[in-house]
Image (tube, helix red, strand yellow):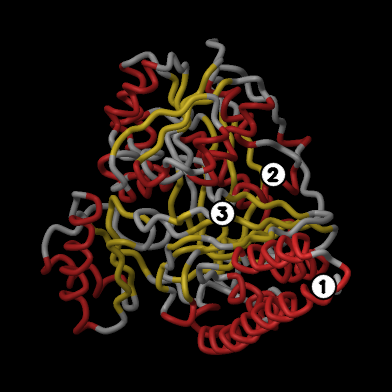
Amino acid sequence: MRKINKILVANRGEIAIRIMRTCREMDIATVAVFSDADRTSMHVRYADEAFYIGPAPSKESYLNAEKIIDVALKSKADAIHPGYGFLSENAAFARLCKKNQLIFIGPSPEVIDKMGDKIEARKAMIAAGVPVVPGTTEAIQSEEEALKTISQIGLPVMIKASAGGGGKGMRLVKEEREILSSVRAARSEALAAFGDDAVYVEKYVSSPHHIEFQVMGDRHGNVVHLFERECSIQRRHQKMVEETPSPLMTPELRQQMGKHAVDAAKAVHYVGAGTIEFLVDNQLNYYFLEMNTRLQVEHPITERVTGVDLVKHQILVAEGRELLLKQENLKQQGHAIECRIYAEDPDNNFMPCPGRIHTITQPLGLGVRTDGYVYEGYEIPIHYDPMISKLIVWAENRQEAIQRMRRALYEYKITGVKTSIKFLEQIMDANDFKEGMYDTNFIEKNKEKLVQKGSCEKDCQDMVIIATYIDYFNRLNKVIPTKQLNPVENRWKKYTYQKNFDRL
């Protein structure tokens, strides 16, 4: 066992701050890294030490493994926490950490390689007895093979990149005439995104639910699951809203899927926090989709209903300690929902909206948590993901959790950039969501209604803010009659009012 006294967080934004908060509670020193675009970022201010690692583009900074290792060695860090994204699922980086006697807070490079390759992951799950979507277990070698294989499986099918993720290198094929063009497009996109053009074929599961199970394992062979998260509110395969427990789940289904999630993790000797993702159809048949060998964006809702700090247990397991969690002691208490707040314009096809934040008012109150990294005056860079915060609420039941999220979104005010807040409010108001009757096609089915309604309300809100500022300014000179002030006081008062208004 090796004690960790200092951790370099190889990430930025809200996840870097979230990791550092747990480190501070554990009396572990933290090291931040930053690019040109992040010199004034909050994670740089929060850390005990901060080091510059390069220009704004990710490949020259946050994806530059050698620079990050160099900083870790210079700062005398014991370990590196990769967060999510960037180098978090990069086996070569994990090997580089090991080579330099740095603890990589995550699974072994071999597991990252195996589960990062979707074909190899399918083979491992089949061997472990975990249900998988019908499809191929080898990469498609030719267009002729693609035609033959798809004819055997039957349309519709999904063509997926073996090294893929996040919807890249993925194509839905519904008609025979689309097969060859889809194979070529998937291969081209996969090669550009991952440097690997291998693709495979899966049967398309119509209108599925995307349900994932959080798992945690140690080096002593212990693995537990911390229940499920419902992640079906997605746009272009990117999640926007998550909740737990899933409204689809039954106690029997939860037990079965949880067991398979643990079996999947044990099959690859998994160490650390990971996620087993499933597709579930309307008949409650479920199939392994993929494994994420890292902490997930939506992990806070699991923490809220279980009371478990997942980052803390990641660190303890990385030190070589035996897992403190026991399956029989883990319970779900209440209901939690997470909304991802993006700096983007829902009225303009969700175009990213980087820029300077003028004002920000974050929601507070019972059962509300905000994981963010922006502040008034902060310039959101164009170089990274547009997610600026995560809003998490908890309540005793699902209905109250939805009501609390509606209230929290109403209180969340950001000016200077467009955000997805109003769009998320409309999701909370949608009947299908309130009734728990939704799947991965929810946003596509309701997009026009959600965007149009949200756009109108956003315009009205902007008008109210402007009118309030004007009214405030008009009232300022009426607060103290000028005849009660001597000339010097009068000049000072007018200057102060004008300065305050200019600031607004």
On residue 482, the disc is: 1
Q: CA distance from mark 3 to mark 2?
A: 14 Å
| Amino acid type of the residue that numbered disc 3 sits on in the rendered structure | Glu
Q: Secondary structure at mark 1?
A: helix
Front residue of 307/448: it is 448
The answer to which of 212 and 400 lies nearer the viewer is: 400
Q: Which mark is residue 212?
A: 3
Does label 3 or label 1 sit earlier along the sequence?
A: 3
Q: Secondary structure at mark 2?
A: helix
Instruction: Answer few, some or many: residues within 10 Å of disc 2's Cα (few below 14, many 20 plus, some between 14 and 19).
Output: some
First reached walking from the N terminus: tag 3 or tag 2: 3
Q: Earlier in the sequence, mark 2 or mark 1?
A: 2
Q: Which mark is residue 303?
A: 2
Residue 436 found in image quarter:
bottom right
Horizontal side, residue 156 vs residue 287: left or right: left
Q: Quadrant of the N terminus?
A: top right
* Residue at position x 47%, y 75% in the image: 345
Viewer-nearest residue: 389 or 122:
389
Looking at the rendered structure, the secondary structure element under dot 3 is strand
Give the label on residue 93, or none.
none
Between the residue at mark 2 and the residue at mark 1, the CA separation in whole angstroms equals 57 Å
In the displayed structure, would residue 231 be above or below residue 28? below
User: Which mark's residue is nearer the viewer, 3 or 1?
Assistant: 1
Name the amino acid type tagged 2.
Glu
- Where residue 287 appears, x then y in whole percent? 49, 59
Mark 2 vs mark 1: give the one in front.
1
Whether the residues at callouts 3 and 1 have beta carbons within 8 Å, the answer is no
Image quarter in which the C terminus is found: bottom right
